[in-house]
Image (cartoon, grey):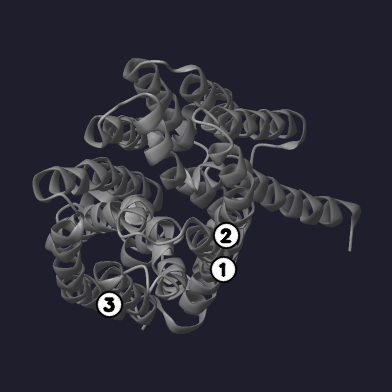
Amino acid sequence: MTNLEKKKKVNVKLTIALCFVMIFCGLGAWAQRSLFTVPITKALEIDRTVFSFSNTIRYVATAIVNIFFGYLVSKFGAKKLIVLSFILLTLSPLCYAFANTIWLIYLGGLFLGIGLSFASTAIIGYVVNKVCKKNKGTIMGLVLCANGVTGAIMANVYTPLITASAFGYKNAFFVMAVMAFVALLLILFLFREPTEEISQSELKTAQEKKENWVGIEFSVAKKKAFFYLACACILVTGLTLTAVSSNSRPHMEDRGVAINVLTIIATVSSICLALFKFLSGFLYDRFGLRLTITIQLIATIIATVILIVITPKLGMLGVAYAVLHGVAMPLETVMLPIYAKDLFGQKSFAKVLGIFVSLNQIGYAFGDPLMNVFYTIFGSYDIGLLVMLIATAILIVALQFVISSSNKLKRKDGII
């Protein structure tokens, strides 16, 4: 092996490791955001629905920015965007920590949304697609499982800080700010702009071996009916998963599940999230898109049913919810680049990925407040959970049509 080849190999490994750090200190630091809903709203005497609009601002900001993802990353490169992201991710938790009114919380939500635009799924998908030639699903899963790893750790770090006093949540936000700042320094000094993109000859060879699909141009993709059905499915997926996951902790608290049990559930959920993010990528690489997303959506349905029936006596059933929640949540992250690549191919990957991430974020934006509207009207999350369960069942059927339509195009190209 030549020195140049060794250098390339080390750079790829370092880039993947830094991507893991980005998720660990960025998205992962916010993995336990549901822990903060009750303490912040109580301490500042804010209505839950009013508070939930900070998440709406976050997701709308991410959605708007990601519409221009392809243009921005080609103009400025990945590193500059990532550095900007971690500056904002350092400021965001400080806004939450020092907030005495809802407006500074909303500003924190705005910073968080813009920050995660270039420190989460889209940028990771872009970088992995640049530097990795095969097993991209597995590598994506490995990197994004950092979110679950952090969540498992921070559930046990945040909880004692939050419960120490009425304003204990402020100290948890200070921890977040430090994590983001450390990641910022690492990116500044160690991250190099990814340049090892697959060449056209390598792509052609991969297609001949049925390892990669060149796919269709975006101008062609946007004329396909199944593109719009896929977009609708991505949006609804983001809405339903966020509606359920963001309010699972408050719902179980309302049902009287003990605090020690809730901590166990949060820890198990994060561990399983990390595990199944990796396994979802691995499962996709081995068995394809249809089986992977079907398993994830069925897990979503069962997890939602558990939340509907949970009681203090059945509190430990929440552990089963945590496991199934871990199976389902990669639909929000790992699966978005996989959807873009598998359904439409390499040619339209960047543009389709940006749109999918934007639509997913729009779903996030409306999922949390919608569930809290149900809470305000009915006094519990039960009706909202039932609505999300039905929507998920419809998703399973709709996505089968999307995948079948994409497979028809692949058959024409001799891929399957």
- Could you tell me which secondary element the residue under label 2 belongs to? loop
Going from N to C along the chain, the mark reached first, 1 or 2, is 2
* Residue beneath the point at 55% across and 27% down: 170
**Neighbour tally class for label 3: few under 14, some 14-19, many 20 plus, Cα within 10 Å:** some
Identify the residue shown where x is 14% and y is 69%.
Answer: 390
Q: Earlier in the sequence, mark 1 or mark 3?
A: 1
As helix, strand or loop, the secondary structure at mark 3 comes to: helix
- For marks 1 and 3, give the one nearer the viewer: 1
Q: Which residue is mark 2?
A: 145
Left or right placement of residue 336 versus residue 186 in this view: left
Kind of residue indicated by mark 1: Phe
Q: Are marks 2 and 3 in contact (CB under 8 Å)?
A: no
Image: 218 above or below 81 = below
On the image, the x and y values in percent for residue 35 come to 46, 45
Residue occupying image coordinates x 62% and y 51%: 156
Q: Residues within 10 Å of mark 1 (few under 14, many from 20)?
A: many
Which residue is identified by label 1? 278
Which quarter of the figure has residue 101? top left
Residue 407 circle label:
3
Q: Are marks 1 and 2 in contact (CB under 8 Å)?
A: yes
- Amino acid at the residue labelled 2: Cys
Visible residue check, residue 348: no
Q: Amino acid at mark 3?
A: Asn
The CA span between labels 2 and 3 is 28 Å
Whole-angstrom CA distance, mark 1 to mark 2, is 6 Å
Where residue 290 appears, x then y in whole percent?
Answer: 33, 79
Question: Could you say which quadrant of the image residue 413 lies in?
Answer: bottom left
